[in-house]
Image (cartoon, rainbow, N blue to C red):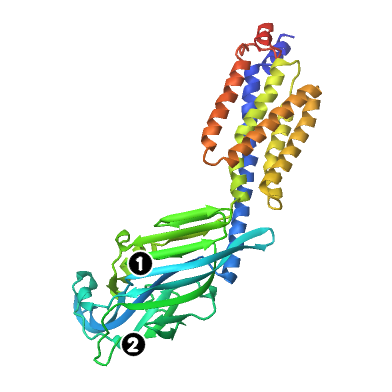
Amino acid sequence: MFELERRRTWRDSKLVKVIGVGILVLLLLIPLAMVRGLVGERQQRQLSVEQELAAIWGAAQTVAGPVLSIPYDSLCEVQTTAANGQVVTSFQPCEKIGHFLPETLSVDGPVTPELRSRGIFDVVVYRTDLRLQGTFAPPKFDEMARDAAVGAGPIGKVHWERASLSVGIPDLRGIRGRVDLDWQGQRVPFAPGVVDPSLWTAGLRAPLRLDTAAGKPAEGRIPFSFSVSLAGSSGLNLLPFGRQTRLALRSPWQSPSFSGAFLPESRRVGKDGFNATWNVSYYGRSFPQNWSSVQTASLAAAINGSAFGVDFVQPVDVYQQTERSVKYGALFLVLTFVTFFLFELFQPIRVHPVQYLMVGSALCLFYVLLLSIAEQLAFGVAYLVAAGATVSLLGAYAAAVLRSKRRAGVFAGVLALLYGYLYVLLQAEDYALLLGSIGLFLILALVMLITRRVDWYGSATAPSEDAIAGA
């Protein structure tokens, strides 16, 4: 008899109940982690679909150039190993390429994005008609010769007749139509190819003759211009190759993300789209106006790191929203179990751990419902449907567990408030931390107020009269 009464006292202990509920919360973190893994898997699937469509339509484009390239004779350092194993350095005749950037570069054009679908996944692609124009200063190799970083050997004969203008475009499949260069009033067609593979791996080049009857280039600024129709996906970027570079883009896309090494000097984003203008001086970059081909590899990181432009992001990413909501999963479990526990604490009812587990399972299933419905409908609608179904299910279940429709109504109301609070946090990205900390503080204060007179050392599930009166 004594042992039976002691066993009942241990089982009815409030502290033991709290510890048991805590263990259940820890166990339910396992399915929550599985849900997060499912969200990540769907994100990876979306990325693979984007890559598949980009392989057909065109990848993210970074327009580089134009660059004026002129071959010249020089000496190259060659190291050989002698018979005795000693390394011997010698200089042999070779051909290098001098690269010259424009004095002014202006790029302007409209960008028309659209959504392409494959199954349930949407990918942002675009078309753009860019107009590039500017001027080159007369190439001067004496400036390059004074640069000690050019490498060993003097500058010999310059092959002005074999000059070329090149433009880097990472995915040539995105080019739509013919591209012709207007060089000093002369029309020169571009062809696929690269002058210096270490500069870029894909692009266009146009052969030029800079020599005159005297065998030297003409003096004065050299104007150029050309237009290119380009298709791509996700983003459009430019390298600031001009001594003064100007980029002006306009698009009906309402949610642009300006990214890269430089932000727009002026921009306007509204319901009708955006207009953005960049003005970049060569003082803001870390590579020179001209260099030799032997330097290209060492300058590649600085050149690629100077890209700037715009990314066409989707305004609502269901996977990011769902992942953010799953991060609050443990908090939802704790708050819902605390609500159940308070009913058990202040009412003559007893909730079995299995019933806690059922409620926790329904809370975890909410995120799977949210993800699956959000892939088909708008996120707000999907959230309303998933939350409504979860609240209805748990409300009906609570009516039996709590043995009262009124208590079940209160529980369902609390749960609905929690889901509404979570939705506000998901929408208020900039103020999520502020609203979250204030909300948690108020919830903790309310729980402390309700349980301030509870005798946690007591063993009975029913509270004392003082605790009930205090509540």
Q: Residue furthest top?
A: 466
In the shown orientation, is residue 163 left or right of residue 121?
left
In the shown orientation, is residue 338 left or right of residue 263?
right
Q: How many marks?
A: 2
Which structural element holds mark 1? helix
Tell me: residue 80, above or below residue 377: below
Give the label on residue 209, or none. Answer: 2
User: What residue is pinned by disc 1?
Assistant: 300
Q: Mark yes or no: residue 83 visible.
A: no
CA gap, disc 2 to disc 1?
27 Å
Q: Mark yes or no: residue 212 visible.
A: yes
Give the label on residue 249, or none. Answer: none
Q: Quadrant of residue 421?
A: top right
Of the 4 image quadrants, the one containing the N terminus is top right
Tell me: residue 187, above or below residue 326: below
Which one is earlier in the sequence, the residue at label 2 or at label 1?
A: 2
User: Could you say which is closer to the camera, residue 268 or residue 292?
Assistant: 268
At a point 43% along the width and 68% down the height, the residue shown is: 107
Q: Amino acid at mark 1?
A: Ala
At a point 60% along the width and 54% down the height, the residue shown is: 43
Q: Amino acid at mark 2?
A: Arg
